[in-house]
Structure formats: C-alpha cells, structure tokens
Image (cartoon, rainbow, N blue to C red):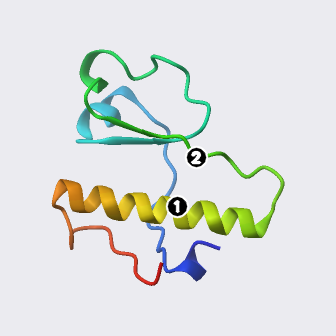
C-alpha cells in the first residue's frame, strides 16, 4: 500500500542492536505503546523522537492509508527540521 502512495522501501528489516542504535543520529519510535523510559537513558536519551501513532490491527485499508500519510507528513517535517532534504528521503504527492 505504501508503494501506491509514492513510498519506496529499500533494504530489508533488521533486528535492533545496541551498536545500530549508537550509530544512528536519530531514532524515530512510531508506536502508541512504547514502554516508558525505554530510550530515556545513556547514548539514546537525546536521539529519540516519539510519534504516538496507533497500529492498524484489523486490516482496515482506509485506516492504514491514513496512518501511512501521517507518517509521511511527519517524516517530511523531520527531514526539513534536520536540513537533510535531498539525501535519502523524498515522498511527493501526499
């Protein structure tokens, strides 16, 4: 469905490791049930952006589409805030 909204998903899913989290400049947690305090310490404390976006568990296509659009909107805003436009993210038409 994301592809139909202009999102290209590259790469393969990978497990989160401590090394991977340390290497990243920013961590975006997209969930409505992130355990309190999970990233509130050590090297992660100032890297995490939390977006409270509910999961779609019932297969409702309209709701899934709405959630994808919300994530795209927030990513576009984040990209502008960090001044990294034209690097690895671009989604138009939303």
Question: Label 2 near label 1: C-beta < 8 Å?
Answer: yes
Q: Which image quadrant for residue 85?
A: bottom left
> Which residue occupies 32% across, 60% down?
77
Residues 38 and 13: in front is 38
Decide which of tag 1 and tag 2 comes sooner along the chain. Answer: 2
**Residue drawn 15% across and 60% down?**
83
On the picture, is 37 further left or further right than 20?
A: right
Q: Residue at x 33, y 33 (%)?
A: 21
Quarter of the image for the N terminus: give it.
Answer: bottom right
Circle 1 Cα neighbour tier, 10 Å, few/some/many (<14 / 14–19 / ≥20) = some
Picture coordinates of residue 70, whole percent (x, y): 52, 61
From the viewer's perspective, tell me whether residue 31 is left or right of residue 92.
Answer: right
35 w.r.t. 31: above or below: above
User: Depth check: 17 or 40 in front?
Assistant: 40
Q: What residue appears at the point 28 percent right and 67 percent down from the top-left corner?
A: 88
Tell me: residue 55, above or below residue 43.
Answer: below
Per the image, the residue denoted by label 1 is 70
Q: Return the x and y of residue 68 as percentages of the image width and height.
A: 57, 64
- Name the residue beneath numbered marker 2: 53
Q: Is residue 88 left or right of residue 3?
A: left
Query: Of 67 and 10, which appears nearest the observer?
Result: 67
User: Looking at the picture, how far across and down is residue 58, in whole percent?
Assistant: 84, 54
For numbered disc 1, what is the local secondary structure? helix
Q: Residues within 10 Å of mark 2 (few under 14, many from 20)?
A: some
Which residue ends up furthest to the right in the rendered image? Answer: 58
The secondary structure type at the circle numbered 2 is loop
Residue 80 position in % (x across, y down): 23, 62
Separation of residues labelled 1 and 2 (CA atoms): 8 Å
């Amino acid at each position: 469905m994301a592809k139909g909204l202009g999102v290209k998903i590259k790469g393969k899913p990978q497990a989160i490791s401590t090394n991977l989290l340390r290497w990243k400049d920013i961590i975006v947690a997209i969930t409505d049930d992130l355990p309190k305090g999970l990233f509130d310490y050590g090297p992660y404390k100032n890297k995490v952006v939390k977006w409270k976006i509910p999961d779609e568990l019932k297969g409702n296509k309209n709701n899934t589409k709405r959630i994808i659009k919300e994530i795209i909107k927030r990513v576009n805003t984040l990209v502008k805030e960090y001044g990294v436009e034209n690097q690895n993210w671009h989604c138009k038409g939303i």
